[in-house]
Image (tube, grey):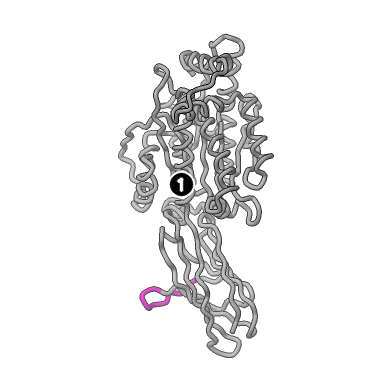
């Protein structure tokens, strides 16, 4: 981090600590500014305390765990924001937001904490948001580069702003386009840094992650000759257009970056959202008074991305007897989300299991996909029928043949790693 950056951070923190209390004019602008000043920037100690308070105050919506440890041995927090009762969050479509990876997105920690607090508080009051958090999960890493923040505040306390720069750039240390020749700061090998390794392991262990996003202080036009699957390009364009964000273009020429890893290695959709602001000089830090507006943008974009996640739905089954103990069941599956249940690249890489329909209460004999009056046989594995990925808004008409006793209750469950699950009940009659 540049000395100028620490100078700005020092001045900012000192102003917050030493400014005498005043009664500001009760204008809309003054109220917004006071709200921002009350929050300010989080020291490492304050960040840990704030996250602990959130988990204690909202145990039904916030869980704080450790992503891993930094190079200095400090814990890296990760938040799970969801309605925690009922179905496991690991079985719901997920959005992963990673903040404070580099010096120029240091401000992301303050936005992340505000988003976590706002989501939990509003979910207590608004049933629509509570319902959203009941079917999706938001994973939030408020500060990946915890050592950077610790060094900044340690320098502030000591009065010395001279720091030894880190030799490895975390956002060039991921195993996707890793380039030690083109990027001297890429590290001795991919995932050599414990922070990058912990984040990569987190993503690999959670195949339900659909979208990965970062908040950046600026967006640069990045063009390249890389060719991505057309379906994925179109999905990214739809996802990012309404937010003014960048999708696949954000990972072009970004060898070893986290977002490139998320898409190229895991097939997750990616979104880089720019947060332009007035800088105190040539620095990538907003003034405290600007944080309120940036927080609102961060919250709105997070909710929009969460609502865009794929969502599997099942229609009411229609059951008909076709012979003694033999039954035909017709039903429809639908993806009501704005994203497909898998990117084309994720399907190609086979990083997730394709959707299935599970039938409980009867023995599955055969199954077919019905389209344009024609039926195409589907593979049956015990009580599960193998399906395919569903595009945004796509419907699948299914016909399932089962054997069972008249009156037996049925439960049909659609299961998708990145589309969630849905179920419908019926009876053989």
Q: Is residue 177 visible?
A: yes
Query: Are there few (<14), some (14-19), or many (20+) residues within 10 Å of tag 1?
Result: many
Give the dominant element type of the magenta stretch: helix, strand or loop: strand
Q: Quadrant of residue 375?
A: bottom left
Residue at which label 1 appears: 305
Q: Is residue 201 left or right of residue 292?
A: right
Q: Which residue corresponds to the image point at 57% horizontal and 18% vertical from the top-left?
A: 21
Is 152 placed above or below 318 here? Answer: above
Q: Nearer the viewer, residue 179 or 160?
A: 160
Is 318 placed above or below 161 here? Answer: below
Q: Which residue corresponds to the image point at 55% horizontal and 54% vertical from the top-left?
A: 131
Residue 221 % position (x, y): 32, 33
Quadrant in which the C terminus appears: bottom right
Residue 94 % position (x, y): 53, 49
Q: Nearer the viewer, residue 429 or 51?
A: 51
Which residue is the extreme one toward the bottom? 324
Residue 354 % position (x, y): 51, 60
Q: Which residues are magenta?
A: 371-378
Q: Nearer the viewer, residue 152 or 35?
A: 35
Which residue is the extreme one toward the right? 56
Residue 91 among magenta residues: no
Q: Is residue 207 visible?
A: no
Residue 341 % position (x, y): 47, 56
Is 295 placed above or below 156 here? Answer: below
Is 81 placed above or below 23 here? Answer: below
Q: Is residue 172 left or right of residue 199?
A: left
Q: Secondary structure at mark 1?
A: helix
């Amino acid at each position: 981090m540049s000395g100028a950056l620490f100078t700005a951070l020092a001045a900012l923190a000192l102003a917050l600590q030493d400014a005498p209390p005043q009664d500001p004019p009760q204008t809309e602008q003054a109220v917004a500014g006071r709200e921002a000043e009350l929050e300010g920037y989080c020291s490492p100690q304050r960040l840990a305390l704030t996250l602990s308070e959130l988990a204690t105050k909202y145990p039904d919506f916030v869980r704080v765990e450790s992503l891993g440890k930094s190079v200095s041995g400090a814990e890296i927090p990760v938040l799970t924001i969801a309605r925690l009762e009922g179905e496991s969050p690991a079985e719901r479509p997920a959005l992963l937001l990673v903040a404070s990876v580099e010096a120029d997105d240091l401000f992301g920690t303050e936005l992340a904490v505000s988003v976590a607090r706002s989501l939990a508080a509003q979910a207590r009051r608004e049933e629509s948001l509570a319902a959203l958090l009941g079917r999706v999960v938001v994973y939030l890493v408020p500060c990946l580069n915890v050592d950077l923040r610790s060094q900044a505040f340690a320098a502030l306390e000591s009065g010395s702003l001279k720091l030894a720069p880190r030799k490895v750039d975390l956002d060039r240390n991921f195993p996707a386009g890793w380039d030690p020749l083109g990027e001297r700061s890429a590290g001795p090998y991919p995932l050599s840094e414990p922070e990058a390794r912990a984040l990569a392991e987190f993503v690999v262990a959670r195949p339900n992650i659909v979208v990965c996003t970062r908040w950046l202080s600026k967006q640069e036009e990045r063009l390249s000759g890389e060719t991505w699957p057309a379906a994925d390009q179109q999905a990214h364009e739809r996802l990012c257009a309404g937010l003014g964000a960048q999708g696949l273009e954000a990972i072009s020429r970004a060898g070893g970056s986290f977002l490139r890893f998320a898409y190229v290695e895991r097939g997750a959709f990616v979104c880089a959202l720019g947060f332009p602001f007035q800088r105190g000089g040539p620095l990538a830090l907003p003034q405290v008074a600007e944080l309120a507006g940036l927080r609102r943008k961060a919250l709105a974009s997070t909710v929009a991305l969460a609502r865009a996640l794929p969502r599997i739905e099942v229609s009411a089954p229609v059951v008909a007897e076709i012979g003694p103990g033999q039954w035909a069941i017709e039903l429809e599956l639908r993806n009501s989300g704005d994203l497909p249940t898998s990117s084309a690249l994720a399907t190609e890489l086979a990083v997730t299991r394709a959707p299935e329909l599970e039938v409980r209460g009867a023995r599955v004999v055969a199954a077919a996909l019905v389209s344009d009056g024609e039926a195409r046989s589907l593979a049956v594995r015990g009580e599960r029928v193998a399906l395919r990925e569903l595009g945004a808004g796509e419907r699948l008409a299914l016909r399932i043949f089962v054997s069972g006793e008249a009156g037996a209750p049925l439960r049909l469950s659609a299961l998708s790693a990145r589309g969630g699950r849905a179920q419908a009940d019926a009876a053989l009659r």
